[in-house]
Image (cartoon, rainbow, N blue to C red):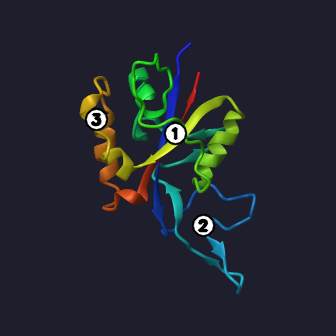
Amino acid sequence: MGADIHFYVEKYSNEDYIGPKDILEERDSKIGIITEDNTLSNCYRWIPVEKWVYDDYWDVSYDDRFYKGRNYYLFSVLADVRNDGSIDPISQPRGIPEDASYPYKMLLKTWEGDYHSASYFTLEELLKVDWDKYDYIDGFSETIEKMKGINADPWDIRCVFFFDN
């Protein structure tokens, strides 16, 4: 049985976000804050970069994903997943960011505990990694380059991800 990574990119933004509604707080089609005069006001928060669609499950078109490979070496580097002990990971899994975008949290809910090793990195953190010390990260440099094209501030871009078996 193989392991897969579910890798998504979020940006920190106050843009209008039209997408899955935050049904837990019964907000309008934008996710923001309710002000004292009962209006919806945008606030800075993490929103998904990929286009999210909800049908019977959350689905992001495979071609739209920032990373779509199955590279166990890279999994070991990112989160110590499928590591035989020979690879020094960037970090142990950090868990789900408390301020993760609502669609990402809903995606995790659909997996109902069948995911593991959830983690995240800002683009700034990924840019500080010495990637030359890793041998087999095919395709991930293109992912980082694509992430760099989203926003000039690498602190305002992050990847969130988890694994399944």
Q: Which residue in the protein does label 3 denote?
A: 131
Q: What element carries label 2?
A: loop
- The image shows residue 31, relative to residue 86, as above or below, that is below
- Callout 2, which amino acid? Lys
Which image quarter: residue 153? bottom left
> Residue placed farthest to the top in the image?
1
Where residue 51 sits in the image (x, y, percent)?
49, 49
> Residue placed farthest to the left in the image?
132
Of circles 2 and 3, which is in front? 3
Of circles 3 and 1, which is in front? 3
> Which of the marked residues, 3 or 1, is nearer the chain's N terminus?
3
Is the C-beta separation of discs 2 and 3 under 8 Å? no
- What is the spatial separation of the Cα atoms under label 2 and label 1, in whole angstroms? 24 Å
Which image quarter: residue 39? bottom right
Q: Which residue in the protein does label 2 denote?
A: 30
Q: Which residue in the protein does label 1 denote?
A: 161
Q: Is residue 12 visible?
A: yes
Q: What element carries label 3?
A: helix
Q: In this view, does 33 lie to the left or right of 141?
A: right
Q: Locate the C terminus and report the quarter of the image it occupies.
A: top right
Where residue 85 sits in the image (x, y, percent)?
45, 18
> Which of the marked residues, 2 or 3, is nearer the chain's N terminus?
2
> Residue placed farthest to the bottom in the image?
37
Q: Is mark 1 on a helix, strand or loop?
A: strand
Within-10-Å neighbours for mark 3: few <14, some 14–19, many 20+: some
Q: Is residue 149 left or right of residue 101?
A: left
- The image shows residue 2, relative to residue 24, as above or below, that is above
- What is the spatial separation of the Cα atoms under label 2 and label 3, in whole angstroms? 38 Å
- Callout 1, which amino acid? Phe
Where residue 111 sits in the image (x, y, percent)?
67, 34
